[in-house]
Every structure is written in structure tokens, then in C-alpha cells.
């Protein structure tokens, strides 16, 4: 059986197909990823974007629409996916996907472009508790993104630059808009870029950490969402949470779509 | 302006004014208030406790220079020298960095005092929408603060948030208010509180077919809702007075008035000078007190 | 004067309000200074020359987070600051 998960994020659409494998005695091998696809919609509206992403994903995986038994949508635009059988919140999908990728994970930290949250999950990947802040850019990737623009660095270079700094410069501004002027004045006062990068990532990490604390930090911690690609953030997060390691899954952008596909499959059974 | 690409839509009008009918040379006490805010700086000069002149400009890279430049505007226009001013009080975010100030007073107390002068002693509630903060103040008939709160954590509901939208829409900031009423129907407020998210929401609205004016209306409404939710903690007792740069934006002011069900007191004076004016008035009172105790001692 | 220190953001309203009229005749010698485990309070001379308690500037924008250890989730049943201040000048909005 093949099921699909489609994640309608604020910037991207992600599709994942999974297939039943039935490997005896290896429960984590019950499902395998059949195909995945990411699209950066531009002018298309949400509805068209979902359709196009799904078509392209089918082509990529070499399957037809009829073979897909069920589609579950997630993400901010999940209600706009007309062909979805049902939908699930990004909190639920993220936790399910994360625990599938790293079965030892208990605390899921999800930092995407516009949201940051902490989720406590059980062994089946179900949400026990969560705390998030979707109303403020300061605890999300958007903060780092807007600051990297101010520093004229790519997000990747920004993260790497941060690793080269051992300074701790506290940022006074709690707001992304205000922090931008703080960064500008740091640049004016000739503060090295790597120190500024670290200050910004430390600030995001401390805000994310405050949310995770609300659900409790239980080993092991897994990070999902776009910030997985930012090694500087991962380091800042480890320090803020006071943990030795943070699990980083493969294909981090697809975790929520994967979770949705798993939920589609499991609710069918 | 042909250089459309480099146009600074956020830039607001700087302003320098003196009261030609008054003669500062004949005054007994000349005091000044300097309000160095995070976005704008103002200098106000008072003669014998009456407003004489002011200058309002954008804050530069450092507070001392901003303070000096702001005052220089009034000095130049009036032929006054710094030595002619008896007492200077600094206020605002950069108040401790005004090099020639004798004392610093918080902007909360100064705004209440300034509003009491500008809007009359019946003013009880003051909403100050500054560049990087928003304050709600309740005061008594003397302009003394009885209850206040200040929100400077977040750009939502501040002048900075408005500048961001002016830039995004590529419409001069002074036109935002009038344009927000030029819509076929009043749209729902932008739902995101956060300025960063409101920006992407605004872009989405444009894409979905909203006119620029309608997006601006949605944003003005959101800003009004935001500050009204802040002021509710203090409560609104009449008279109600609005200070700060956004007081010049009818798109926000009219919507706040509608939400609160009360009209704000009108003033002919520049709403941005309230803090500096309050500081200059504090200086005047202080000079009177000193003179009184000196007479007593003698 | 009621001084509200704090903020309102997407996640809620977080203010510590101090009734400074109660501070001017503080009978417990500014117990708030030591009552708060994080030392968030300070004694200042305000604009009207009254000696009163205030929340330090560095905490005003992050109260939700700084106070969380003293809230029920941190194992407290009553707030150390409001307990220490017997005149009842200090209140939390959340």
C-alpha cells in the first residue's frame, strides 16, 4: 500500500510517498519512503501549488494517482489541499515523522521559517504536550534569515560563521524588526560578522529553548525543520538546552510530510 | 522624484518651527527639553513656561550628535546660543547621552506633562505611538503620571512597523492614512501581530487581488487593534490624547477612535514633540522652585 | 502611581505592576530586592523624587521567561516577590 503526505508550508510544498515493506521482526522497517518532492511555489495559489507539487512528485516516484490510497495534508495551508483525504496539524505530523526517523527521540524541537516549537512525543510519535509561538518571528528561522540578509551572508555561511566565534554578545532586542537595527549598529561598530552571527543564533536558540522548557527537556532531543541545516544554530541550541547532543534526521525538510504519510497509512490499518 | 528605486518611502517630514510673536530675549527663564528617541529626536525650547520653538528630526547614529543637531535647528532659527538656555532636560531612550543636559527624566513623565500642555489639563489618558515603542499613560490634572505601561518589546503597533509597510507598498508614509480610507469596503485587519509575518500576509493579500489601499487599510486596522488592546490595561478616561509620529496618521487614529468609541483631542502642534515639550516644562518648574528657595534663603 | 513593567505579545500579556505609592512607606525594607530569586527588582528615585521599586530594564522584555521558574510549573504555589512584599505593591498580570 502507498500513502502520501503533503506539507503546505509558508514557503514550500513538500510531498512524501511511503510504501508498506513488511519486514518481519523490524517494526521500524514497516514503511519505506517511496518518493519525495519539494517545490517552491511562486505565483501559483495554494490550490494550484498543491496540485502541481503532487503531480511532479508522482512523476518523480514513477507511480500513478490511483496507486496512492490516501493523502493526508499538513502545514499552514493544509485546508487548501482539495484532494487530501484528511489533514493533521504540523505539530502532530512533525512529531510522528521525527520519531519514525529517530525512534529514541522524546523531545522534538521544530524550527521552521515562521514557527518554532517544542513537542514532547511518546514512543509511537504521538504528541503528549507542546508549546509553540507562531505569532512572533523572533523564535523562528525568519529571524536568522532576516539577520543574515543584514549581514549580507547566505544562511549557510551565516551558520558556519557563527561556529567560528567564541564570543557571547547579548542581543537586547526581542523583536526581529528591532534586532535588525541592533545588528546594523553592531556592523557599524566593526563587530566581526561571526560574533554577530553567533549573537543572533544564540538569541533564536534561547527563545526556542524557553518554549521547549515549557514541555520539559527529555533525552533524546531531535531537531527538525529548516534550521537543521544551520550548524551554528544546532550548536547554540545544544548550549541553550544544556544537552550533549541533538539528533538531526536525514531529509529534515520532509519530516512533516513524512509524518502525514505515516498517519495516513496507520489510520488506514 | 525620478530616482524611484532609491526613494525612501518610510521617511517622514522633519520639522523646525519657532513662535515669531515671542521674544526670547525678554524672557526670564529659557529652558529646553531634548527627547532622543530610537527613531526621532526632538528639541523644544520654552520661554517662561510657554512653548517657543521646536525641531524634530531623525535620530542619527549616536545620541549626543542627535541631541546637538536637534537643538541646533532651534538655536539657528532664533539666534539663541546654548548659553542663553538656563536649564536643559534630556528624555527618551538616549536621555542619559545628551551632553549638555542638566538632568534626565523618563519619557513617560515627560509625555504626560507635554500632553497636559498640548491637550489641556483635562487630558487623562495618553497614548504615545513612538518609533520603537508604544506607551499608555493615565495622568492627573497636573500631568502627573498615575498609571502607565510601555511596550517596547515588539515592533507591532509602533512607527517602525508603519515604516516597514510604507516601504513594502512603496507609498510615502504620509499618504498611508488618507489612502487607507480610499477603499470600496473596509477589509478585515491583517491577522498577524508580528510585523515580519504581517509583511508576508500583506504580500499575500496583494497577490489575492487586494488593492494597495485595501492592504494599507487592513494594516492600519491591525495597528489600531493592537494599540487598543495595549491601552485596555490602563483603561481610557476622557480626555484622550495621542502623541508620537503615528498621531499624524489618520488611518490609524480614526480607527482607534472608532474602536474606543471616543475622540482624541485635536492639537495644532506637532504630535511628536510631546516628550521634549514635557521635559522643557519640567525644567521651567524646577527653575521656579530653585528661584523660590533662593528667595527664601535670602 | 501604578507602574506596569512588561509587554504584551503574540503569546500573552506579561506585566509586573508596582503600586509605587505603597513603596514610599515600605515597612519591610524593600524585601522585593531579596525576595526575587533572580534579583529582578531595584530601588530607584523616580521622576517625582519618590524612592520606589522597579523591575530592572534587562528583564522588562522577557518576563514570561524570567518568571517561569517561580510559576506553578516551577514548583511554587505562591510567587516569592508578591509574598515578600507584604504591603501588596507587586502584582503579576498572568
Image: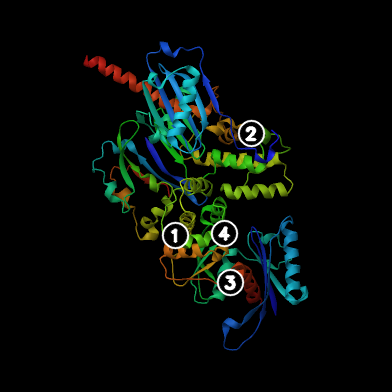
Residues at badges 1 and 2 in contact (C-beta under 8 Å)? no
Neighbor class of circle 2 (other Cα within 10 Å; few <14, some 14-19, many 20+) is many
Mark 2 or 4, closer to the camera: 4
Sequence-first tag of 3 and 1:
3
> Are dots 3 and 1 on a single chain?
yes
Rounded to the nearest angstrom, the CA distance separating label 1 from label 2 is 45 Å
Picture residue at 44% right of the left edge, 72% below the top? A219
Extreme residue in the bottom direction: A24
Where disc 4 sits, the SS reads helix
Residue wearing tag 3: A97
C-alpha span from label 2 to label 4: 36 Å
Q: Which is more N-terminal, label 4 or label 3?
A: 3
Instruction: Kindly tell me whether residue A8 is visible in this rendering.
Output: yes
Q: Mark 3–mark 4 contact, CB under 8 Å?
A: no
Q: Position of residue A186 (x, y in %)?
A: 47, 48
Q: Position of residue A82 (x, y in %)?
A: 73, 63
Residues under numbered marks 3 and 1 in contact, where contact means CB atoms less than 8 Å apart: no
Q: Relative to the observer, which residue lies in front, C94 or A236? A: A236
Cα distance, mark 3 to mark 4? 25 Å
Amino acid at each position: 500500500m502507498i500513502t502520501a503526505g503533503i506539507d503546505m508550508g509558508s514557503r514550500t510544498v513538500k510531498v512524501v510517498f511511503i510504501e508498506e515493506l513488511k519486514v518481519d521482526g523490524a517494526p521500524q522497517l514497516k514503511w519505506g519512503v517511496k518518493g519525495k518532492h519539494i517545490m517552491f511555489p511562486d505565483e501559483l495559489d495554494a490550490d494550484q501549488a498543491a496540485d502541481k507539487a503532487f503531480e511532479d512528485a508522482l512523476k518523480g516516484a514513477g507511480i500513478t494517482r490511483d496507486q496512492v490510497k490516501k493523502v493526508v495534508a499538513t502545514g499552514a495551508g493544509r485546508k487548501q489541499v482539495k484532494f487530501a483525504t484528511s489533514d493533521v496539524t504540523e505539530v502532530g505530523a512533525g512529531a510522528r515523522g521525527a520519531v519514525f526517523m529517530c525512534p529514541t527521540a522524546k523531545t522534538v524541537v521544530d524550527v521552521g521559517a515562521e514557527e518554532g516549537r517544542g513537542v514532547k512525543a511518546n514512543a509511537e510519535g504521538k504528541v503528549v504536550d507542546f508549546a509553540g509561538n507562531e505569532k512572533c518571528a523572533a523564535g523562528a528561522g525568519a529571524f536568522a534569515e532576516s539577520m543574515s540578509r543584514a549581514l549580507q551572508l547566505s544562511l549557510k555561511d551565516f551558520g558556519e560563521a557563527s561556529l567560528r566565534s567564541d564570543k557571547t554578545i547579548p542581543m537586547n532586542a526581542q523583536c526581529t524588526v528591532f534586532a535588525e537595527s541592533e545588528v546594523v549598529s553592531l556592523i557599524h561598530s566593526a563587530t566581526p560578522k561571526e560574533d554577530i552571527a553567533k549573537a543572533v543564533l544564540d538569541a533564536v536558540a534561547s527563545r526556542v529553548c524557553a518554549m521547549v522548557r515549557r514541555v520539559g527537556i527529555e533525552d533524546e532531543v531531535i531537531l527538525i525543520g529548516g534550521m537543521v541545516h544551520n550548524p551554528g544554530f544546532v550548536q547554540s541550541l545544544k548550549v541553550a538546552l544544556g544537552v550533549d547532543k541533538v539528533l538531526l534526521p536525514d531529509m529534515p525538510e520532509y519530516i512533516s510530510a513524512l509524518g502525514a504519510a505515516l498517519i495516513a497509512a496507520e489510520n488506514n490499518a | 522624484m525620478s530616482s524611484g528605486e532609491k526613494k525612501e518611502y518610510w521617511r517622514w517630514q522633519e520639522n523646525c518651527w519657532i513662535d515669531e510673536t515671542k521674544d526670547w530675549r525678554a524672557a526670564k527663564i529659557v529652558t529646553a527639553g531634548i527627547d532622543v528617541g530610537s527613531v526621532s529626536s526632538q528639541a523644544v525650547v520654552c520661554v517662561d513656561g510657554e512653548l517657543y520653538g521646536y525641531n524634530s528630526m531623525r535620530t542619527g547614529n549616536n545620541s549626543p550628535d542627535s541631541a546637538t543637531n536637534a537643538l541646533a535647528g532651534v538655536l539657528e532659527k532664533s539666534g539663541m546660543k546654548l548659553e542663553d538656555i538656563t536649564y536643559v532636560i534630556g528624555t527618551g531612550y538616549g536621555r542619559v547621552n545628551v551632553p549638555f543636559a542638566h538632568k534626565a527624566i523618563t519619557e513617560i513623565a515627560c509625555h504626560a506633562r507635554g500632553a497636559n500642555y498640548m491637550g489641556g489639563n483635562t487630558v487623562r489618558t495618553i497614548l504615545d505611538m513612538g518609533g520603537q515603542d508604544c506607551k499608555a499613560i493615565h495622568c492627573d490634572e497636573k500631568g502627573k503620571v498615575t498609571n502607565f505601561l510601555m511596550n517596547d518589546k515588539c515592533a507591532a503597533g509602533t512607527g517602525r512597523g508603519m515604516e516597514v509597510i510604507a516601504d513594502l507598498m512603496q507609498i510615502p508614509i504620509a499618504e498611508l492614512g488618507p489612502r487607507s480610507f480610499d477603499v470600496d469596503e473596509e477589509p478585515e485587519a491583517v491577522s498577524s501581530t508580528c510585523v515580519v509575518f504581517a509583511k508576508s500576509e500583506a504580500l499575500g493579500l496583494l497577490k489575492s487581488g487586494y488593492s494597495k489601499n485595501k492592504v494599507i487599510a487592513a494594516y492600519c486596522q491591525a495597528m489600531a487593534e493592537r494599540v487598543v488592546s495595549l491601552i485596555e490595561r490602563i483603561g481610557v478616561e476622557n480626555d484622550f490624547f495621542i502623541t508620537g509620529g503615528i498621531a499624524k496618521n489618520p488611518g490609524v487614529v480614526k480607527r482607534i477612535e472608532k474602536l474606543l468609541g471616543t475622540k482624541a483631542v485635536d492639537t495644532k502642534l506637532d504630535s511628536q514633540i510631546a516628550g521634549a515639550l514635557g521635559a522643557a516644562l519640567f525644567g521651567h518648574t524646577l527653575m521656579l522652585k530653585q528661584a523660590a528657595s533662593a528667595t527664601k534663603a535670602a | 502611581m501604578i507602574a506596569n513593567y512588561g509587554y504584551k505579545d503574540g503569546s500573552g500579556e506579561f506585566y509586573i505592576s508596582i503600586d509605587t505609592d505603597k513603596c514610599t512607606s515600605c515597612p519591610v525594607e524593600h524585601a522585593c530586592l531579596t525576595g526575587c530569586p533572580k534579583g529582578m527588582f531595584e530601588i530607584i528615585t523616580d521622576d517625582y523624587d519618590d524612592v520606589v521599586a522597579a523591575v530592572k530594564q534587562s528583564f522588562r522584555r522577557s518576563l514570561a521567561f524570567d518568571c517561569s521558574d517561580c510559576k506553578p510549573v516551577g514548583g511554587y504555589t505562591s510567587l516569592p516577590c508578591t509574598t515578600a512584599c507584604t504591603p501588596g505593591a507587586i502584582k503579576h498580570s498572568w
